Amino acid sequence: MKPGWTSPLPRPISKAVLHRGAMIFLSGYKYHKFAGHFLPPCNMSFKGRLAVDRVLNRCLPSAIGISAIVSNDSEPYDSQVSSVPINPRDSQTHFVSWFREAWPYIQGHQGSTFVLVISAEILGSSFLDGICQDLSLLHGLGVKLVIIPSTRIQIDGLLLQRGQSPNYAGSYRITDIAALEASMEVAGRFQLDIEAKLSSQPSIPVLRRHGNKERWHVGIGVASGNFIAAKRRGVVDGVDFGATGEVKRLDVARIRKRLDDNCIVILSNLGYSSSGEVLKCNTYEVATACARELQADKLILLLDGALLDDNDRLIRFMTLQDADELIRKWAAQSETAARYVKSVAGNDYAKSLGLVTVSMNGGASSSTEGDGCDGMDDDSDVHGLAIGVQDRHLSDHGYLSELIAAVFVCRGGVQRVHLLDATIEGALLLELYSRDGVGTMIASDQYEGTRAAEESDLPKIEELLQPLEESGVLIKRSREQLMRDLESFIVVERDACIIACAALFPYYEEKCAEVAAFAVVPECRGSGQGDKLLDYMENKAVSMGLKSLFLLTTRTADWFMRRGFVPCTIDYIPEQRRANINLARGSKYYLKKLETRT
């Protein structure tokens, strides 16, 4: 059973739900704790999924101990309640609430460019149908999509069927004539398959109901072509890579033109040389080069599992520094992992992680000719990062390759990388249109320059707070008081200047914390620095085991209310803090409950 999957019911027997007089059997259902809801078997019809989803995921109060689920002998699991009344208005209310919650994300993603990699494990599975349906939906919501399918497993399988052995050296396939023929055959087959799935249209009766006759027979435009200029990898460390290519250049202008023409672009892992050859390229080299050259808003990797921590819990968010630290940790635990990091990411990156003693005996060089062309630091016309199959043998370090690729593209200007478990039904929609999502997000700009305050910051903090204290927005704090509370302050630094600060005072007994002395320099207001600082403080409070934040304010209530704070009475303020409130100031009290990210 995959990590995250749990049995939803106490007895392994056939189950049924009574829904509008019809018995719907749920023998194939599972509950996924990362997704937070029931997921249907792949062979269930769409209408069946929809009907059951209304009951399981919208109307029932929890996944465990559901009162509406009964056994074959009609005994309810909850002896006190044998059925759940279904109110159509509840379903309508749920839909409206979801739509309103999703609206900021719909608006925010409109016009954005996403590069998606469909892993080979997912490409050959039954999950592809649902993914293509969701990609069509994203396209309809105004997202510009570049899709890059990985075909490693399919090529290997075809070679084995033909009595050939797949061969690799480092991150690259050794492409002989048989491997190139298999690569072209597989690439063509799956490109056509994806195009066909994306061409699926809503039923005419649905469109006719709303009077839109013009679009009855208009499908989604899909574009592909010779967008990738490649060059032969050649002979590296005595290994002749044959028809294996490296990405030399992407025709970014033509890709953008197709995207602007409202087409979904599909890139294969085949490139074309200046001499007219077809070359087999590394899928992730194509994807990372494409994301960087297009300056995509997101790179999304659709995988067959989730990125988990040591306790098998989903890692929901990582900064670049967090990702570096996890890669360093994995490399320290395994010499094989350390060698892989060095061979893929390059010497300079490995040294930055402290991996200076790793021997490369038997490892593959990441250079194209001679030495010094490290993947993370290459300034030639190769702008992608090739990752291979070595980390598949590192069972304790799942998705090491993808994590390295995420760091690479983030440092190349892509703001967000998402690692998604595509076996979760609707993972793309849940990740992009809900607050917490169901995958792992690596962010390049989030919290950049945000850190704990140091003693040398004290004069700059005073300078930042002084105008707000003089205008009465903040209470006056003496230097001694600031020095005493300095360890509670967080600052945002840019170009050696403090541009924002705030203090977080925890009350562990009440499991809450006060947000105080919140200030942003005038020239940076409206640029998201305050949101960045508040989000950092919320995540820090959650990591401290706290459940809520509170604050006192006289002038800035609107800003905080737009970010989830609600008015409260003084009774919600910890007694210790209550005793020190200056009631004559007339401050208003606001509270925000924090969502625990498991």
Image (cartoon, rainbow, N blue to C red):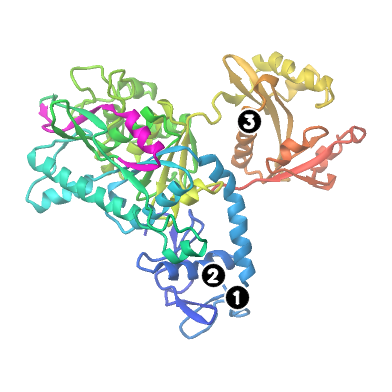
- Circle 1 Cα neighbour tier, 10 Å, few/some/many (<14 / 14–19 / ≥20): some
Residue denoted by label 2: 55
Give whichever of discs 1 and 2 has the lower sequence position.
Answer: 2
Q: Residue at x 32, y 35 (%)?
A: 287
Residue 31 lies, with reference to residue 322, above or below; the image says below
Q: Is residue 444 magenta?
A: no
Q: Is residue 256 magenta?
A: yes
The residue most toward the right is 584
- Find the magenta span and give its range: 239-266
Q: Nearer the viewer, residue 422 or 324?
A: 422
**Residue 392, position as x, y percentages in the image:** 27, 43
Residue denoted by label 1: 84
Give whichever of discs 3 and 2 has the lower sequence position.
Answer: 2
Residue 40 is marked as none
**Kind of residue at badge 2:** Val
Do labels 1 and 2 touch, CB within 8 Å? Answer: yes
**Kind of residue at badge 3:** Leu
